[in-house]
Image (cartoon, rainbow, N blue to C red):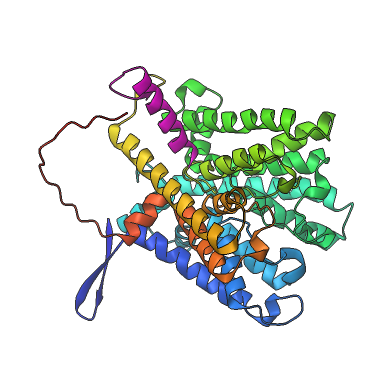
Amino acid sequence: MEKSTKIKGKKFRMTSTQTIFCSFFVAILLGSILLSLPIASNDGTTTDFLTCIFTATSSMCVTGLVVVDTATHWSLFGQIVILILIQFGGLGIIFVASIITIFLGQKMDLIQRSTLQEALSLQKVGGIVRLMKFIIKGVILFESLGALILFTHFIKEFSFFKALWYSIFHSISAFCNAGFDLMGIKGKFSSLTSYQSNILVNVTIMLLIIIGGLGFTVWDNIYKKRLNFRKYSLQSKLVILTTIFLIFVPAIYFYFFEYNDSVGVNRVLSSLFQSVTTRTAGFNTRDFSEMSEVGQAISTILMVIGGSPGSTAGGVKTTTFAILIISTFAIFKKENEAHIFNRRIEIQIVKNAITLFMLYLNLFLLFSFIICKIENTTLLQTFFEVGSAIGTVGLTLGVTTSLSNVSRILLIALMFFGRIGGLTFIYAVLPSLNKEAGYISEDIVVG
């Protein structure tokens, strides 16, 4: 579907993907302007605009990469602006606008529904209003519960109002897979390292990250079918199984090979938390720079894979990863079609998965090489930072704060690309030509 307006007598058409693209761009620009105001900084001075743009992009794209410490640099006003951007970015501007439309008693037309379908990665337009109401109830429920649980611990450390604000901020940040934190008061850029042995904080943050990263349609499927896994849609099955695999398999590696300095529950918590947080969340309870190169490489791969479609997470997405694996095994077994759970995967879906993967891989490598040459960092360090940006994660090896302006601009572009999605970005930027030619086929030997 397309939006049409008149500009100087000419018909201008804005597609659904272009609407999503522009909404994020405008929100980031407005957020940058607000953060540049003297009231937004702790010392009452104006923050340079590139830092504001970087922070606003990281917030809106729920990434968590920062060049100034959130707790010590930004005032309460600045932190509120960041949190609003995180919430809007996690849900999507189109979704928030549609909720306001419904709240005001107005009906959405077909164009609005089509745009919302694109924004939430839905397979059909039908029932979209009901799903929106279900999503907003779920978001309020999970973020409120998360804040309430965190408050029971933070009240032991901080004053009532600070504990309340910290609980709300970290609950929303975790649910939206943003990774922004206010623990810089304990040490700049320290994230949640002071809570590495705290079971309550660790488990609450992990659950919020996982729930937010599953995807709204998966929520709906679980709500309708309860625990009857066989009746779940194929997408829900793939998301759940892939999520479980990507949490526990890396956690096992981290447990046996990375955290030998910890024992018992602390070791289990550290291993699970780092495995969960690399899937686009951005918090950390351990210093990633202390990891081995293999551990950092595994973390980079997890960051690029990311969360699931139609969720608050970014990355290539779990379903893309799953489809590539399923298709690979189908080829190994010399089968004509990729299939799983007695369901065939359409060839167009496989093509989309391959295209998306190659797009992310090429951008990941290209930007890594460029930044590596500019900054003279090691390639693994650069891979980690670039993977964190394109996967909208926010984890760092301590390189981000020392990057040049050119490298920061490149990371801004990657964060934006990673959040709105590869295919959405391409469809928004490139015109749809819709030209097909009946070319003669010819065989090519592969492998």
127 or 181, nearer to the observer: 181
Q: Is 327 contained in the magenta span?
A: yes
Q: Considering depth in this image, is 34 or 52 the residue closer to the camera?
A: 52
Which range of residues does the magenta coloring cover? Answer: 317-339
Dividing the picture into quadrants, the one containing residue 226 is top right
Is residue 270 positioned above or below 341 on the image?
Answer: below
140 sits to left or right of 347 = right
Indicate the position of residue 80 as horizontal and vertical percent values: 67, 67
Query: Does 101 appear above or below 308?
Result: below
The C terminus is located in which quarter?
top left
Quadrant of the rendered structure where residue 4 is?
bottom left
Q: How many marks?
A: 0
- Residue at 41 percent across and 60 percent down: it is 20
- Taking the image as shown, residue 327 lies to the left or right of residue 33, namely left
Residue visible at 53% across and 28% down in the picture: 241
Q: Position of residue 89 (x, y in %)?
A: 54, 58
Tell which of 195 and 67 is nearer to you.
67
Quadrant where the image shows the N terminus: bottom left
**Residue at left 77%, top 50%?**
192
Quarter assignment of residue 351: top left
Classified by dominant secondary structure, the portion drawn in magenta counts as helix
Q: Position of residue 251 (x, y in %)?
A: 67, 32
The residue positioned farthest toward the right in the image shown: 156
x%, y% of residue 359?
39, 48
User: Does the image show residue 50?
Assistant: yes
- Residue 109 in view (yes/no): no
Residue 182: within the magenta? no
